[in-house]
Image (cartoon, rainbow, N blue to C red):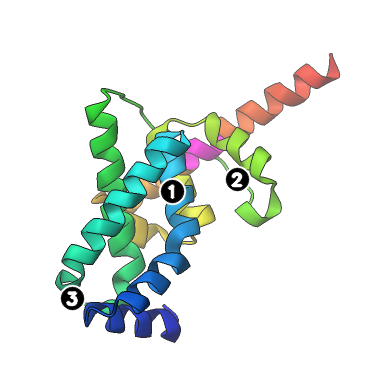
Amino acid sequence: MNRDLERLVRRAKERDPDAFTELMESQKYVLYKTARAILDNDEDAADAIQDTILTCWEKLDLLKENQFFRAWITKILINKCTDLLRMRKRVVYVEEYPEIPAKEEVSDAEWKELLAVLDEEHRLVVTLYYAQGFRTKEIARILGITDSAVRSRLARARERVKKYCQEAEAHERL
């Protein structure tokens, strides 16, 4: 974690509202991408993010180690998204994925198209790995699963995306 972010976390823990606002601003893009990948619509993503920010403000003093802030807030967001899915009785299963290009290598439209082929579980792992840059061990900690389960989900998601791309390419040839 960079020093500026760690400094903001420390100041926010001291209940500095300006520092907290700046901290949330620095995280809004990755929070949105994660929530959007799980919930698949902007309104639900906005609700989950709003709930996450409120929970973060209320419970920031419970964060023991400032360097784990990103993982901590991501876990809160995932829990909020899961709560929204349960409330709306949506059940989505995520699968593993083949090698998916890093987010910077594809356009937003292409990224959304690739994520659309995956269920929630796989979209989440792919987003945390490729868009947010978490390592598999960090993802395992955030999701409460084993590192091998994360790697397995990534592999299955890569395979699904690869199959989708091959089918799309074959369809284009026709």
Q: Earlier in the sequence, mark 2 or mark 1?
A: 1
Residue 141 visible from this viewpoint: no
Query: How packed is label 2: few (under 14 Cα within 10 Å), some, or many (20 or more)?
Result: many
Circle nearer the viewer, 2 or 3 = 3
C-beta proximity under 8 Å, tags 2 and 3: no
Specify start and end residues of the magenta stretch as a single range.
155-159
Pointer 1 residue: 34
Residue 153 in which image quadrant? top left
Query: How packed is label 1: few (under 14 Cα within 10 Å), some, or many (20 or more)?
Result: many
Query: Whole-Å distance between the Cαs marked 2 and 1?
Result: 16 Å
User: Where in the figure is residue 45, as x and y percent of width and height?
Assistant: 40, 42
Magenta: predominant secondary structure element? helix
Pointer 2 residue: 100
Q: Nearer the viewer, residue 173 or 70?
A: 70
Amino acid found under the numbered disc labelled 3: Lys
Above or below: residue 61 compared with residue 6: above
Residue name at image x 42 percent, y 73 percent: 22
Above or below: residue 41 compared with residue 17: above
Amino acid found under the numbered disc labelled 1: Thr
Question: In terms of secondary structure, where does tag 3 sit?
Answer: loop
